[in-house]
Amino acid sequence: MHIRKLVKAGQASHTVSLPKDWITKNKLNKGSVVYIEEKSDAELLVTPQMHQQREPAKKELTISIDNKDQGTIQRELTAAYVNNYSSIIFSGKQVEKNAKLLRSIVQEFVALEVADQSASHMIVKDLLNLEEISIEQTLRRMDMIIRSMLKDSIAALEGKHVLDKIEYKDEDINRLYFLLYRLLKSALIDSHFAEKLSLSNAEILGRWYLIVNLENVADCGKNICKILSSLEKNQDKEKLKELYHQIQESYELAMKSFFSKNKNSADDVAKRRIPLFDVCDSYFEKNKTAQTALLIEQFKSMESLICNIARIVIDHE
């Protein structure tokens, strides 16, 4: 933070000095023009050029894949994606050998495409225009996919083979999560972009917390489906179905509360958590198996995540 005093300059104006480091970084000198934008009653934004003239910086990153496992490569590519690198180059002696794996990793992200490949390099281009993405529509898409996942998970109790379908949908949720994470991070960095999205910093934080919880709800749905697909025959499946339906109803009410900004409905979701936990504990007392313990843990985790979503609505001002 820099502190400056106002200096009176004439009858109607005052001046304030600008930090030397900022002037140097933006290549300004005597006679340069700066632009002042009124952001609020108490805030001014000083920029070295008009926002309309600014273009997103083209960033390039090289990721060496030699002696790295798949997880490390995925994490490095994820970091490049959410930090808006427009060109990402995989390099190393093993590029050609691992081309199929690298392409499969690239496909995990929206709008990344392999543009060129040689024996030692694979060039990945980012074709995404962030300004064309609607946060509201993307959130609703995540919501609809998760609703479908929960419905499919319940079908596993009826002996239907739905795990492959669930896993594909979970991958879609992951793609949308990283897309929105990137979008929201960009909005925090660039106030002009945030203005285009009509989001305050508090709203950006709320939506980031929402997508984190949605992604985790989807993971719970996938885990629950895996457990239900191999459930012992002596389990009370009707009771489990009833319990899962209650969680599904909590989720749908939480998301309806979020989109409608209904604090009363969100509070109703929060009130469901403890009674539902009691039902979970009661079921486990009657069915004490390792499998049941895992299932109940996932049920409780999902309900807690749903309550986190309700909390976003309750805390919003």
Image (tube, rainbow, N blue to C red):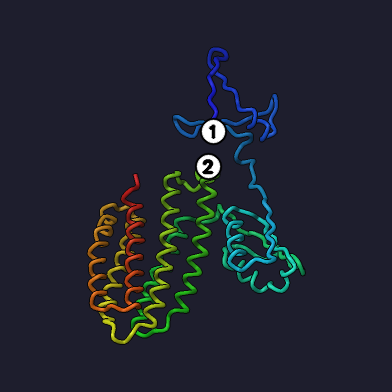
**Quadrant of residue 293 within the rendered picture:** bottom left
Q: Is residue 127 left or right of residue 310?
A: right
- Report the residue marked by disc 2: 191
Element type at marker 2? Answer: helix
Tell me the tag on residue 149.
none
Confirm whether residue 213 shows in the render.
Answer: yes
The one of 224 and 245 positioned closer to us in this rendering: 224
Residue at position x 38%, y 78% in the image = 227
Q: Is residue 87 left or right of residue 233?
A: right
- The 10 Å Cα crowd at callout 1, few under 14, some 14 to 19, many 20 or more, is few
Confirm whether residue 252 shows in the render.
Answer: no
- Report the residue marked by disc 1: 45
Q: Residue furthest top?
A: 11
Q: The disc labelled 1 sits on which kind of residue?
A: Leu
Residue at position x 50%, y 43% in the image = 195
Residue at position x 50%, y 65% in the image = 174
Task: Judge whether 109 appears above or below 32 on screen.
Answer: below
| Label 2 to label 1: alpha-carbon separation | 10 Å
The one of 9 and 283 positioned closer to us in this rendering: 283
Asked if the residue under mark 1 is in contact with the one under mark 2, i.e. CB atoms within 8 Å, the reply is yes
Element type at marker 1? Answer: strand
| x and y, in percent, of residue 45 in the image | 54, 33
**Quadrant of residue 49 within the rendered picture:** top right
The one of 12 and 285 positioned closer to us in this rendering: 285
Residue at position x 44%, y 58% in the image = 211
Q: Residue furthest right?
A: 119
